[in-house]
Amino acid sequence: MTRVVTSKKGTTTEVVYLITNLSPAHASPLRLLTIVRGHWSIENGSHYVRDVTFGEDRSRLRSGVAPQVLATLRNLAITLIHRTGTTHIAETRRTFSHDPALALDLLFRFWFSQQ
C-alpha cells in the first residue's frame, strides 16, 4: 500500500506492506483499505486520546492494580466527555480542570441516569 504522510516536517510517501490471512479473493484493495482505515480510526480515536491527552504512556505506575484503575478512570472520563456531545476531548478536559463543578455535575447526571 502506498500512503502519503503529512507531518510538521513536510509530506512524504511511504510504501507499507500488509500481511493478512484473507484469501486473494477476499483481499481486494478496497477491503484492505477499509481494514487499515478501521485500525487507524481506533488508534486515532482512542489510543491517541489516552496517550496524548491523558498522558497514559508517561505514567510511572506499572505494578499492582493501579494501572488498571487509572485506565478505568480515563475510560470513564472519555465516556463522560463523549456524552456531552463533543469530540474535543482535550478542550473539554481543560474546561473541567478549570471548573471541577462542571465535571462533577456531569458525573452525577450520568450516575443518576443509570439508576
Image: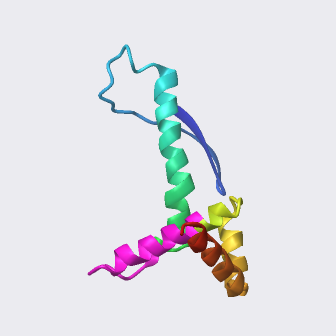
Which image quarter holds the C terminus? bottom right
User: Which residue is most to the top?
Assistant: 25
Residue placed most toward the observer, 16 or 103: 103
Q: Position of residue 40 (x, y in %)?
A: 51, 46
23 to 76, vertically: above or below: above
Say above or below: 78 vs 65: above
Please name the residue shown 66% across and 74% down the image. 106
Residue at 67% from the left image edge and 84% from the top image edge = 97
Q: Does the rendering let one see residue 106?
A: yes
Q: Nearer the viewer, residue 101 or 36?
A: 101
Residue appearing at x 33%, y 32% in the figure: 19
- Residue 103, given in percent of the width and then of the height, sits at 66, 79
Q: Can you give x and y, in whole percent of width and height, for residue 41 in the image?
A: 55, 46
Structure colour scheme:
rainbow
Queried whether the magenta region covers residue 59, the answer comes back as yes
For this rendering, which residue is in front, 16 or 112? 112
Q: Position of residue 67 (x, y in %)?
A: 36, 76
Q: Write down the region rendered in magenta.
A: 58-79
Q: Is residue 52 left or right of residue 19?
A: right
Quarter of the figure with residue 96 = bottom right
Query: Is residue 82 a member of the stretch shown in magenta?
Result: no
* Residue at the far front in the pictured view: 115
**In this rendering, is residue 24 above or below 67?**
above
